[in-house]
Image (spheres, helix red, strand yellow):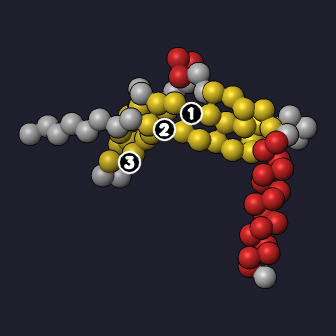
Amino acid sequence: MKVLTSLVIIGIVGISSLMASNYKIDSSHTNVGFKVKHMMISNVNGKFTDFRGFYSLDEKTNQFTSLTGELKIKIEMLI
């Protein structure tokens, strides 16, 4: 039963992706950032500058069908 359910879900996702329009995220007009609570007192904000992504949108229902992204991370240690 689990195999049949999985196949049905894969089929629905596959068919819905055929009706979707694919788009590339414009990194010059997009921000990717985060906020982390530090010692329960203040927030530390950060951002990613090197990223790319793609998404698909079903034009009939105006819903996202997929979202894929990639971030390049640079780690610096201050000693």
Q: Earlier in the sequence, mark 3 or mark 2?
A: 3
**Circle 3 SS class:** strand
For the residues labelled 3 and 2, the Cα–Cα distance comes to 24 Å
Percent from the top left, x then y, of residue 78? 14, 37
Horizontal side of 9 relative to 39 (left or right) equals right
Expressed as whole percent of the image width and height from the top left, the position of residue 75 reads 25, 39
Outermost residue toward the right in this view: 60
Reading the image, the residue beneath label 3 is 37
Q: Position of residue 57 (x, y in %)?
A: 77, 36
Q: Nearer the viewer, mark 1 or mark 3?
A: 1
For mark 1, what is the residue? 53
Which residue sits at x=59%, y=21%? 26
Q: Is residue 66 visible?
A: yes
Q: Residue at x 47, y 30 (%)?
A: 51
**Would you say the residues marked 1 and 3 are in contact, meaning their CB atoms lie under 8 Å apart?**
no
- Residue 21 falls left or right of residue 60: left
* First in sequence: mark 1 vs mark 2: 1
Indicate whether 14 appears above or below 6. above
Q: Is residue 8 above or below residue 17?
A: below
The nearer-to-camera label among 3 and 2 is 2
Neighbor class of circle 3 (other Cα within 10 Å; few <14, some 14-19, many 20+) is few
Residue 41 visible in the snapshot? no
**Amino acid type indicated by mark 3:** Lys
Amino acid under label 2?
A: Glu
Residue that mark 2 sits on: 70
Q: Secondary structure at mark 1?
A: strand
Front one among 9 and 71? 9
Q: Earlier in the sequence, mark 1 or mark 3?
A: 3
Q: CA distance from mark 1 to mark 2?
A: 6 Å
Circles 1 and 2, Cβ within 8 Å, touching? The answer is yes
- The kind of residue tagged 1 is Gly
Which residue, as the protein is rendered here, is positioned at the far left? 79
